[in-house]
Image (cartoon, rainbow, N blue to C red):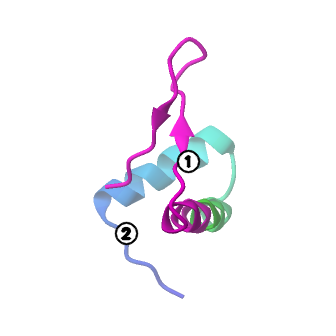
Amino acid sequence: MTVNLTSRASKALETAVELTGDSKTDSINRALSVYAYVEQVLHQGGSIMVQDDPDAAPQKLVIF
């Protein structure tokens, strides 16, 4: 399979690889699994909350 990434997606992939030490393939596989989970939760009417740091209040994740 060949995937053409936008420059934004390519930068995000590089960031994920740097942060995790995973390969690009592993990072893409993990990202797709997380994306499918998020979409499933949203499709069922749920929401995902994120907290940027331990002292911040959780905020609803917005997918754009």
Question: What is the x, y in percent for residue 49?
Answer: 54, 39
* Residue 19: x %, y % from top left: 61, 39
Give the percent coordinates (x, y) of residue 60: 45, 39
Q: Is residue 56 above or below residue 43?
A: above
In the picture shown, does residue 38 fall above or below 61?
below
* Cα gap from disc 1 to disc 2, whole angstroms: 14 Å
For marks 1 and 2, the one nearer the N-term is 2
Callout 1 secondary element: helix
Residue 16 numbered tag: 1
Q: Nearer the viewer, residue 27 or 46?
A: 46
Q: Which residues are magenta?
A: 35-64
- Towards the viewer: 44 or 25: 44
The image quarter in which residue 20 lies: top right
- Give the quarter of the image for residue 35: bottom right
Frontmost residue, 14 versus 46: 46
Instruction: Looking at this view, name the residue that lies furthest to the front.
Output: 45
Image position, residue 10 (x, y; %): 40, 58
Q: Is residue 22 magenta?
A: no
Question: Is label 1 in contact with label 2 (beta carbons under 8 Å)?
Answer: no
Q: Quadrant of the C terminus?
A: bottom left
- Numbered disc 2: secondary structure: loop
Task: Name the residue located 61 percent from the left edge and 16 percent from the top edge.
Answer: 54
Report the quarter where the N terminus lies.
bottom right
Mark 2, residue position: 5
User: What's the residue type where badge 2 is placed?
Assistant: Leu
Dot 2, crowdedness within 10 Å: few (<14), some or many (≥20)?
Answer: few
User: As shown in the figure, which amino acid type bears the numbered disc 1?
Assistant: Ala
Q: Residue at x 46, y 32 (%)?
A: 59
Label 1: how many Cα within 10 Å (few below 14, some 14–19, many 20+): some
Q: Which mark is residue 37?
A: none
